[in-house]
Image (cartoon, rainbow, N blue to C red):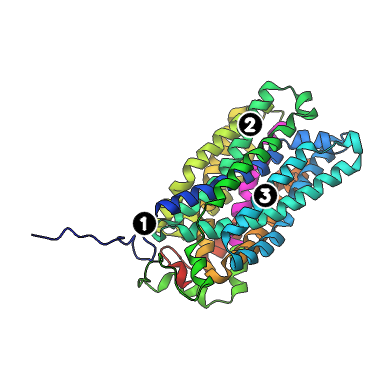
Amino acid sequence: MTSTTKPTSPPDTESGKDAASTTDIKSLGASLTGQILEWYEWSSYAVFAPFIATAMFNKGDSTSALLATFGVFAVGFLVRPLGGIVFGRVADKRGRKSVLMMTIIMMAIASAIIGFMPTYDQIGIWASVGLLVIRILQGFAHGGESAAANSYIPEIAPNAHRGKWGSMVYVSIFGGSVIAYVLGGLISLVLNDEQLASWGWRIPFFLCALSACVALYLRRHMKESDHFKEIDSSEPSVDTPARKERPAIPQSASATRPAWINILLVIGMVSGVTSAHYTWTSYVSSYAISHEGMTTQGAYWVTVVAQVAGLIALPLWGSLSDKIGRKPVIYICAVGMAVLQIPLMALIDSRPWTLLIASTVGVIIVAAGGALLSSIMSEVFPTAQRTHSIGLAYSLSVAVFGGTAPYIYQWFVAHDLAWASGFYVIALCVLTMISMYILPETKGVDLRDV
């Protein structure tokens, strides 16, 4: 009689992590809940930018007020590298979970403060200064959140499905944005523009502060990454699978290269993806409303549809990278945006269907790159330095090239140079292609061997 005994945990594929446990899946959900809330709040600022400009800046010059609003948005990004470095070092010493707890608390407090903040008409320039300070604190927290999440989720993922699991980090970005736009559409449906400018724009920030309590509770019960526990203890974790042999090729090039070169390459790899992302998720709706005369309702709901399409595409792109490799999928994103950026922007006018086509195509292409950022970065940097390296490289690239994209586009448009703004994204997409060409193919690498 043949034996029916099976291995306790059948291997996933060529790497050391077996299939995901129930604890892994629950931890993934807890991490994503907090990230979705953080990005919902962050996106709400962009969604309600025209009304925040009216409330918190001098509305005597609407163009200057909108530029100032996007400028504050960009400043929040510029402090993200500092948050990524500081919180990244904490995560590499005290664990990923501790940082994810701290950042959700900071986000909740900052959101509540924005909701209660007096307007420019009430306290003058101090309203603008106060908003700037809060956005700086939020940017600091977001840098830590992004660094920890981009390390944590790949570390708890089954190795053969790390691309798909890693795409969940960007799912939280798109998911938070979708919630922000849906809420923006609903609020603008119920309230008129005067009510929105007066107090309606505060609603998303109050809701975020309250919802963060749920996310905080869920994160308290997350597991700590086994990869972190391995380097944190002289003894291996009892539930850590035995190391398996794997092909030596995926990580060898990055492992032998100086750390600062890998950081520069990751900055370049992220640049095109993040500039295109913030162009098509944060800027185009404001552009359509302010400069093409599109209705607020039309712009909001069209953007929701486009980002839902991106949400669906993200895990599909991640799964594809688990089969054919990271490089081909990143090239699809970079080449696609370089070719289509200017034609897609030129398509947009006052008719919502033009924004629907342009933004849906743009967001789906961006999703190809965004889906892989977490897995690629975790596969390039070693566990002991992973979080603060990601915090520096990712946050710096997003700050310099992503957070500034709406401001750069708005500046070009305000100076009748809209035609030139597309070349900014195109140049960065070329940089992404070059950086990805130099980086090694990392599909299937065992993170313990990086």
Q: Which residue is mark 3?
A: 105
| N-term mark: 3 or 1 | 1
| N-term mark: 2 or 1 | 1
| Three-letter code for the amino acid on which mark 1 is drawn | Ala
- Front tag of 3 and 1: 3
Q: Which residue is mark 1?
A: 19
Dot 3 surroundings within 10 Å: few (below 14), some, or many (20 or more)?
A: some
Dot 1 surroundings within 10 Å: few (below 14), some, or many (20 or more)?
A: some
Tell me what residue is drawn at x 11 percent, y 60 percent.
Answer: 2
**Quadrant in the picture for the N terminus:** bottom left
Q: Which residue is mark 2?
A: 183
Find residue 198 and name its label: none
Dot 2 surroundings within 10 Å: few (below 14), some, or many (20 or more)?
A: many
Q: Which residues are magenta?
A: 268-290
Tell me what residue is drawn at x 57 percent, y 58 percent.
Answer: 97
Q: Position of residue 138 (x, y in %)?
A: 72, 50
Q: Is 295 located above or below residue 20 in the figure?
A: above
Q: Is residue 340 visible?
A: no
| Three-letter code for the amino acid on which mark 2 is drawn | Leu
Q: Is residue 280 magenta?
A: yes
Helix, strand or loop at disc 2?
helix
| N-term mark: 3 or 2 | 3
Q: Position of residue 346 (x, y in %)?
A: 64, 38
Could you tell whether 300 is left or right of 293 in the image? Answer: left
Q: Position of residue 89 (x, y in %)?
A: 64, 67
